[in-house]
Image (cartoon, grey):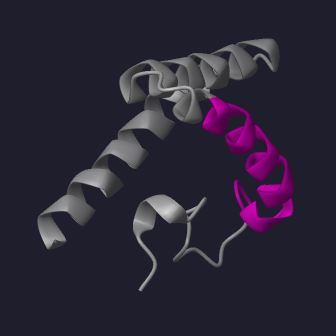
């Protein structure tokens, strides 16, 4: 089986639902853009940057994007849901 960290959308893998609602696209519609985004950050991994710094930079970019789109009010709930999913998965392993 492929290691979770090798899969780009591990936290959405089991979802057949659209991203937000029934009119929203499925997350797979964004896969190519996300792969490009992650390849850019992969360069920092290859240069030996600390993983925590890379993760924080990626999170900062996400928060910035939410601010630019004026949807930052959605972040606390989204982070809670993702944190719950991560914690549940950790308990199952």
Task: Specify the quadrant that holds the N terminus.
Answer: bottom left
What residue sits 55% from the left and 72% below the top? Answer: 13
**Does 77 sit left or right of 67 as displayed?**
left
Quadrant hosting residue 36: top right
What residue sits 29% from the left and 50% below the top? Answer: 84
Give coordinates of residue 85: x percent, y percent: 34, 56
Give coordinates of residue 77: x percent, y percent: 46, 35
- Looking at the rendering, the stretch of residues picked out in magenta corresponds to 19-43
**Does 22 sit left or right of 60 as displayed?**
right
Give coordinates of residue 4: x percent, y percent: 42, 66
Quadrant hosting residue 88: bottom left
68 is higher (above) or lower (below) than 16: above
Nearer to us in this view, 82 or 10? 10
Quadrant hosting residue 90: bottom left
Task: Specify the quadrant that holds the C terminus.
Answer: bottom left
Give coordinates of residue 52: x percent, y percent: 37, 24
Q: Can the viewer see residue 44 in this picture?
A: yes
Prevailing secondary structure class for the magenta stretch in the rendered image: helix
Which residue lies most toward the front here?
A: 47
């Amino acid at each position: 089986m492929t290691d979770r960290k090798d899969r780009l959308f591990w936290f959405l893998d089991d979802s057949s639902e659209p991203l937000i609602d029934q009119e929203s696209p499925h997350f797979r519609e964004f896969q190519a853009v996300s792969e490009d985004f992650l390849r850019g950050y992969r360069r920092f991994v290859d240069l030996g940057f600390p993983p925590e710094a890379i993760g924080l930079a990626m999170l900062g970019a996400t928060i910035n994007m939410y601010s630019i789109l004026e949807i930052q009010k959605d972040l606390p709930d989204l982070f809670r849901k993702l944190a719950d999913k991560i914690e549940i998965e950790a308990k199952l392993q």
